[in-house]
Image: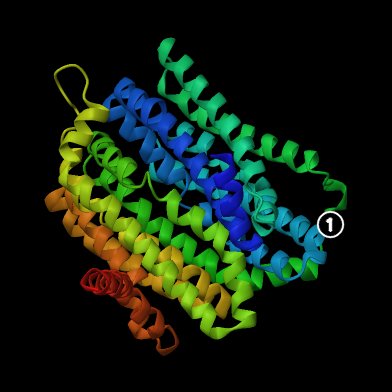
């Protein structure tokens, strides 16, 4: 087995092996976390809290994260791109990015607490939950460490740090369930998880021979980062709005129980979203480099990325749509009853959102490489507007099921249909359409079948 792996490694290029290895590490991380999330973070916590309290917790998480993109400052791909292009700017770029994210996270935390206090003036539990959860963004400023490992395509070190932190966090959740802790303790547990991840990444960064002393904040560098990233900040904000505003609107218009039922479906539906993100984080540096060498190779890789994302989406969405009720019962049924049974119908609709999420993630690399980040913001704003308008009617009439329809339509518009509006992005619309209808995979399959048939005739 080891001999075969060594032989296979020798046959492919070092760059491709590095990308494949990095992607596998990211996949293993998310599979490990998904397993723990299903058993502990989702099933046990959801069953322990019941739909009402589980709904309140997810309402608070959604509210606390509504300004999250401002705290992140859209720097993820920008920092990776810049360090990939010029490794000598590493210390200055990381130091400037960290300073920007830290200030932004403190600012957004204060604004979020003021906002929830205004909207829920007498609901002290909700204010406390949101106040605790919004502090996660401060610890997430340390994500700049992850950006450096991404640029080096060496994510396995960060994987170890995050998995250890995630394991400890889930042990805390088990203890909270065993001692029958009140809801607010689970918010503290999520904050502790963010703190542990930040600490783990810092330790790994130092362990790999790096030093924080070299980090330096540079005003001109910071201004350049913000100028490049502001469209991504705006797009991230509106994406968060149309991905999370549904839970906030359901809570305001119907109640916490319906939020709990809807959130359960969304948790299952979004559980695989790490796959396109993990693939892109590994492949993105090579796409940036391909653009500088050959436009033909660059577009070929982009099309292959869309094809892969769509194939993954279909392989997930089709079986889950068919077996949604069995899946919800398997995960959330307690004894003979299932308080979350209504989540199945929502899941059948919401699972198809992943198709447009995945091709939206794939198009992100192209837009950044082409310097069209402004379009990301515009298309996301259109999607957010569509989602808000549809939610106002659909939630009132159809509840959580309506919110799922609104989210699906909004993602369709933002990640796919909007490309028709702007001439430079119409090529992406064509490439996405080819991927959605599996034109290239079917052509390749037919070609192989034809060759096989010819060989058999001979």
* Residue sitting at x 65%, y 67%: 81
Q: Is residue 18 visible?
A: no
Q: Is residue 143 visible?
A: yes
Task: Provide residue 394's location: percent of width, then percent of height.
Answer: 17, 56
Quadrant (top left, top right, bottom left, bottom right) of the C terminus: bottom left
Task: Provide residue 165's location: percent of width, then percent of height.
Answer: 59, 31
Left or right for 179, reference 373:
left
Q: Nearer the viewer, residue 61 or 163?
A: 163
Q: Is residue 122 above or below residue 223?
A: above
Left or right for 322, reference 436:
left
* Residue sitting at x 61%, y 45%: 140
Taking the view exactly as shown, the residue that stands out farthest to the front is 458
Task: Provide residue 164's location: percent of width, then percent of height.
Answer: 60, 30
Q: Is residue 416 above or below residue 340?
A: below
Q: Nearer the viewer, residue 333 or 254?
A: 333
Q: Nearer the viewer, residue 205 or 451?
A: 451
* Residue sitting at x 21%, y 25%: 333
Q: Which residue is mark 1?
A: 216
């Amino acid at each position: 087995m080891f001999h075969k792996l060594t032989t296979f490694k020798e046959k492919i290029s070092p760059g491709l092996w590095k990308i494949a290895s990095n992607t596998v590490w990211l996949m293993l991380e998310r599979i490990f976390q998904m397993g723990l999330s299903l058993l502990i973070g989702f099933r046990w916590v959801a069953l322990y809290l019941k739909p009402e309290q589980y709904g309140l917790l997810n309402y608070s998480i959604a509210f606390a994260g509504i300004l999250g993109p401002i705290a992140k400052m859209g720097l993820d791909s920008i920092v990776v791109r810049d360090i990939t292009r010029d490794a000598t700017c590493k210390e200055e770029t990381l130091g400037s990015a960290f300073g920007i994210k830290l200030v932004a996270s403190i600012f957004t935390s204060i604004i979020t607490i003021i906002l929830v206090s205004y909207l829920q003036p007498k609901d002290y539990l909700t204010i406390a939950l949101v106040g605790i959860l919004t502090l996660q963004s401060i610890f997430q400023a340390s994500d700049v460490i992850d950006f450096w490992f991404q640029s080096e395509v060496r994510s396995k070190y960060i994987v170890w740090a995050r998995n250890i932190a995630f394991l400890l966090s889930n042990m805390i959740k088990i203890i909270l369930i065993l001692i029958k802790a009140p809801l607010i303790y689970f918010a503290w547990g999520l904050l502790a998880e963010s703190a542990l991840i930040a600490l783990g990444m810092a330790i790994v960064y130092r362990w790999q021979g790096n030093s924080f002393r070299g980090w330096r904040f540079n005003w001109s560098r910071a201004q350049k980062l913000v100028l490049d990233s502001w469209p991504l900040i705006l797009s991230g904000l509106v994406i968060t709005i149309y991905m999370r505003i549904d839970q906030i609107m359901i809570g305001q218009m119907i109640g916490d129980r319906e939020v709990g039922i809807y959130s359960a479906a969304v948790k299952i539906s979004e559980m695989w979203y790490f796959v396109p993100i993990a693939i892109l984080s590994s492949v993105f540096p090579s796409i940036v480099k391909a653009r500088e060498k050959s436009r033909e190779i660059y577009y070929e890789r982009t099309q292959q990325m869309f094809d892969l994302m769509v194939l993954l989406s279909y392989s997930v969405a089709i079986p889950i749509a068919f077996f949604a009720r069995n899946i919800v019962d398997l995960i959330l049924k307690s004894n003979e009853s299932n308080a979350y049974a209504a989540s199945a119908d929502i899941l059948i609709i919401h699972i198809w959102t992943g198709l447009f999420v995945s091709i939206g993630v794939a198009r992100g690399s192209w837009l950044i490489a082409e310097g069209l980040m402004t379009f990301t913001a515009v298309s996301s704003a259109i999607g957010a507007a569509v989602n808000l308008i549809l939610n106002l009617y659909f939630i009132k009439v159809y509840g959580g099921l309506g919110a799922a329809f609104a989210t699906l339509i909004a993602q369709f518009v933002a990640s796919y249909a909007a490309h028709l509006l702007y001439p430079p992005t119409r090529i992406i619309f064509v490439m996405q359409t080819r991927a959605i209808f599996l034109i290239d995979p079917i052509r390749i399959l037919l070609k192989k079948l034809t060759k096989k048939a010819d060989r058999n005739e001979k």
